[in-house]
Amino acid sequence: MSAVEANFDGLIGPTHNYAGLSFGNLASAKNADLAANPKEAALQGLKKMKHLAGLGLIQGVLPPHDRPHLPTLRALGFSGSDREIIAKAAKAAPEVLRNVYAASAMWTANSATVAPSADSADGKVHFTPANLAAMFHRAIEHKTTARVLQTIFADENLFQHHPALAGGIHFSDEGAANHNRFCSDYGNEGLNLFVYGRTAFDKGVAPKKFPGRQTLEASKAIARNHQLNPDRVHFVQQNPKAIDAGAFHNDVMAVANKNVFFYHEEAFLDPSRLIGRLQEKAPDIELHFIEVPKDLVSLEDAVKSYLFNSQLISVPGREGPTLILPLEARETESTKKYLDGLIKMNEYQPIEDVEFLDVRQSMRNGGGPACLRLRIVLTEKEQAAVGANVIMNDALYRDLTAWVEKHYRDRVVPDDLADPDFCQENLTAVDTLTGILKLGSVFDFQR
């Protein structure tokens, strides 16, 4: 059946700031407490979305969440009016206030894991919002994520929505950032590769410096819930060395599209065995493996440049896939040299082109182009069933740009989070946004 891979990007929210909340994310730690520019960040994200839509891809928009998340503060014992709650939290628990203000829902690669209808036994598209149990500021996202996805993909005959996994850190799930799918064409049955950072119940090899966020147990539970064919699923452990180097999710070390796999030599434990297992499980897919040697690009440069946190996309009219990279990959000497050589040897490998986009505001918080998007494979019938006003076009781009220009600040530092006026600004902004996107009342304060 004919299908396409749509990209749904997170619109960067008005509370975008550098609070340094993500342990194991080197960029997040490095830029903690610096001034952020939410307006510039959101406009950069919108330009990225418009660019991909202009290439002929289906490009969707997912909204920022309601931040600060006042229900979390109330559940933690802060009471009174909205303004009083902000004032009390700023005085008694400023670290908690930082967490409930996080704009981290922008990184929708972590929002959920999605299985196409071609892969599921019941022929439906399956969604599981990630519980993001490893980080408090992200663990409060999944209920809103679920409501948003259920609103956009509402047809129960086509879409199946699962709740986030229970079980806390034992079933810690970080979403599609640790999932890749291979196929000969999007509408054909694929091969699903789940990457985990640690096991919850066994004492296996584990990172020493930073936590492995995705568990094997979570990945297996999602594969079961999504009714995937066990013969077309493989689980592999991320190299603990890569996690300790700052690759907190596998999409910092690898990216796939259709039959092409682009990854670092040290991304996985025993990569040669991985290649063999993938070929065994999918003999009908002519897989192409592009392994970047550590002698050409070190782990440190891979993390610094986000070479692999790129989007590998199939552009209509282009024979081979295109890499969408952050500017930092061009500005890092080793990755620029590698990419220049990669394109020159085009007759030996399938990647046809590379493009660089400016997402610096996101990059400074540790999220590149791949972090900002959730991939969803949709047939023509499923595309027609997409609800709300979330598919990027010229009119939506103009409306969202005007919305950002009206509601966003040019400068935000962590101290601004104590300002009760900032709280109201942000809630007003996202309330208006749900009207533009025709999402209805998906946020807690609207219900």
Image (cartoon, rainbow, N blue to C red):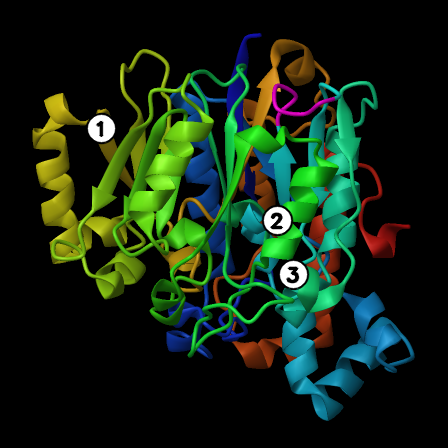
Residue name at image x 64 percent, y 83 percent: 95
Q: Earlier in the sequence, mark 3 or mark 1?
A: 3
Q: Is residue 105 left or right of residue 282?
A: right
**Visible residue check, residue 253:** yes
Q: Residue at x 61, y 24 (%)?
A: 119
Question: Where does label 2 land, which residue?
Answer: 219
Question: Where is mark 1, residue-wise?
Answer: 353
**Mark 2 element type:** helix
Q: x and y percent of residue 369 in the render? A: 41, 45
Q: Is disc 3 placed on a helix, strand or loop?
A: loop
Give the class, few, some or many, for how many residues have Cα within 10 Å of label 1's Cα (few <14, many ≥20).
some
136 and 420: which one is in front? 136
CA gap between label 3 and label 1 equals 36 Å
Label 1 sits on what residue type? Asp
**Residue beneath the point at 39% across and 58% down:** 363
Q: Give the mark nearest the N terminus, 3 or 2.
A: 3
| Residue at (78% x, 41% y) in the render | 162
How far apart, in angstroms, are the residues tagged by discs 3 and 2?
9 Å
Q: Which residues are magenta?
A: 116-121
Kindly state the secondary structure of the residue where label 1 is placed. Answer: strand
Can you see residue 12? no
Q: Check residue 172 in the rendering and tell me which mark sits there, or answer none.
A: 3
Query: Based on the displayed image, in which of its 4 quarters is residue 52 positioned?
Result: top left
Q: At label 2, which amino acid type do we have?
A: Ser
Residue 36 x/y as whole percent: 46, 67
Other residues around mark 2 within 10 Å, as few (<14) / some (14–19) / many (≥20): many
Q: Main secondary structure of the magenta part?
A: loop
Badge nearest the viewer, 1 or 2: 2
